[in-house]
Image (cartoon, grey):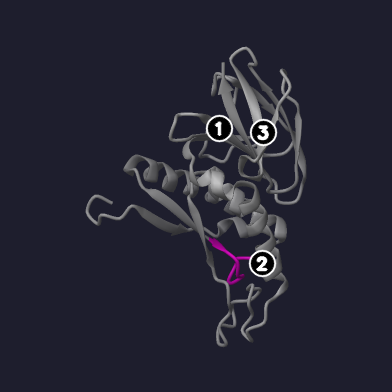
Amino acid sequence: MTRNGCDEFCFDIYDQTINDGGVTNFYRCMKAQNEAAATAGVNCWATLLSSAHWSYRIPTEYQFMWAITHAAALGCKGIVWFRLYDKAIAPEYHGSPIDEFGYKTEQYNMLMRCQRRFQDQFGQIMLDLNWKKSYLTGFPRMSYTMFNEHCHDVVKSLDLFERGVISFFEDAEGKEYFALVNAEMTQPTHFDLTYDSSKADVVMLERNGSIQHKLGDYGEPLDAYPGQMLLFRIDRK
């Protein structure tokens, strides 16, 4: 980045659409790219998959949201989709949002809904947050640390039966935030969150912060469908 003078870069990662081993590689790749971006002080974008080809499968609506929320929670500032349309002569490619005849497919509507839902909830506020650290819950992926009571002085425990992600952020004024993501592609879950209320209040943010809800003193269960993200602000006392 010093040599070329750029302030952002993009990389592609599609393995999450293959199998569970591909999901493991997705996390390893995300960790390496976003930690490198943070070290260099530049923005990182992810190129994610919207077309099936070779061993890569057609994403479901839940998998589209999973990919969007993971990219945001793990530090990416934007997404490029590969590829929105199919060529007339590309027999191994299929399932694009726009097919080789120029028609919008079911994938187009699913991807549009996921993009708009994320933008309505978090699209603006996430651009103003700087990613600091991410942790996994439920299953190790040989990459991010598993979250435990020693990872953060306010958020003390995060219990769920399924797999999840918790990421911490700061805004330009140093205010702290964290995001929870249901890391399952087919199973809904709920997070049992416990935090130290003597140190801070935790406020749930919706609609880019226009709706705010202070959590109870001992935390509370938080439901999330597959791939859904929840966002919170930490108001220290």
Determine contact: label 2, label 3, CB under 8 Å.
Answer: no
Residue 69, x across and y down, in percent: 61, 49
Q: Which residue is under mark 2?
A: 58
Please tell me whether the stretch drawn in magenta is mainly helix, strand or loop: loop
Residue underneath mark 3: 204
Q: What's the mark number on residue 211?
A: none
Q: Is residue 179 left or right of residue 175?
A: right
The residue under label 1 is which amino acid type?
Tyr
Report helix, strand or loop for mark 2.
loop
* Residue that numbered label 1 is attached to: 177
Q: Residues within 10 Å of mark 2 (few under 14, many from 20)?
A: many
Image marks 2 and 1: residues in contact by CB distance under 8 Å? no
- Residue at image location 62% in from the left, 70% down from the top: 52
Question: Residue flagged by tag 3: what amino acid is it?
Answer: Met
- Judge whether residue 94 is colored magenta: no
Q: For residue 57, what is the image quadrant?
A: bottom right
Identify the residue at image location x=58%, y=23%. 235
Magenta stretch bounds: 48-58
